[in-house]
Amino acid sequence: MKKWETLSTDYLYKTRFGNLRKDKCKLPNGIIIEDFYVNEYSDWVNAVVITNQNQIVLVEQYRHGGQNFYLEVPAGKIEENETYEESILREIQEETGYTSLEKPILLGEYMVNPATQDNKVKTFLITEAFKATNQQLDNTEDINVKLFDFEELGNLIKDKVVETQLFTASAYFMAKSALNNRNY
């Protein structure tokens, strides 16, 4: 197997949320794709946040692409000059008001959708979380904080009792596996 060759690149737009570029690509077999679109986004972090009462801290918010409200693990993009650990602790505190004195545990690092995107997500486990402050939301955020029993959330996801998305489900099951096996 060989990589594709990028013959040219044009940006259709650049915004603070991400860029859309159009690449002209030559495949190893010689076929030319005139307009292969790539979404460029910042890397982001998310975390399964568990309190000392074994509750998982989730955020509920409206997602316009899905036209619905979803329960999600706290998440956000990496800001300039931040480590991944600093970023996730900041995001958790801003979105939920929770924090922890424990070091974030890295559960995994994955490309989000390498077919059309260039970013990755790092998923963390935060234990012994506690409410430390009020939310510090941006003016475009409207977030409700919800607590669920950590052990019960898996069934709520499987039975579609809660509306969620792939990154929350995968983060939850990664955290559950890590905690059951203590492999962190």
Image: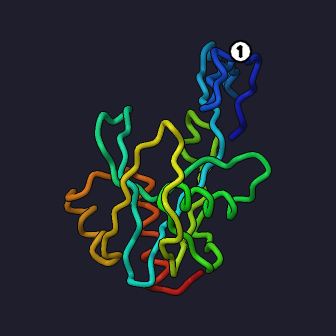
Is residue 109 among what the camera can see? no
Q: Is residue 53 left or right of residue 91?
A: left
Relative image position of residue 31 (x, y in whole percent): 64, 18
Residue 51 sits above or below residue 87 on the image: below
Q: Which residue is mark 1?
A: 10
Compared across the picture, whether 66 is left or right of 11 comes to: left
x, y percent for residue 9: 73, 18
Q: Give the camera-side residue of 123 and 181.
A: 123
Q: How is the image coloured?
A: rainbow
Asked where in the image residue 27 lies, by quadrant, the reply is top right
The quadrant in which residue 32 appears is top right
Horizontal side of 102 relative to 82 (left or right) equals left
Residue occupying image coordinates x 62% and y 59%: 90
- Identify which residue is drawn at 76% across, 18% down: 7
From this viewpoint, is residue 177 visible?
A: yes
Which one is in front, 163 or 30? 163
Q: What amino acid is labelled 1 in the image?
A: Asp
Note whether 127 is above or below 11 in the view shown.
below
Residue 96 drawn at (x, y percent): 47, 60
Tag count in the figure?
1
Q: Secondary structure at mark 1?
A: strand
For the point 38% across and 32% down, the residue is: 65
Q: Quarter of the image for the C terminus: give it.
A: bottom right
> Mark 1 packing: few (<14 Cα in 10 Å), some, or many (20+)?
few
Residue visible at 24% across and 65% down? Answer: 156
Residue placed furthest toward the front: 134
Quarter of the image that includes the N terminus? top right
Name the side, left or right, on which 75 lies relative to 168: right
Q: Position of residue 45 (x, y in %)?
A: 59, 55
149 to 45, vertically: above or below = below
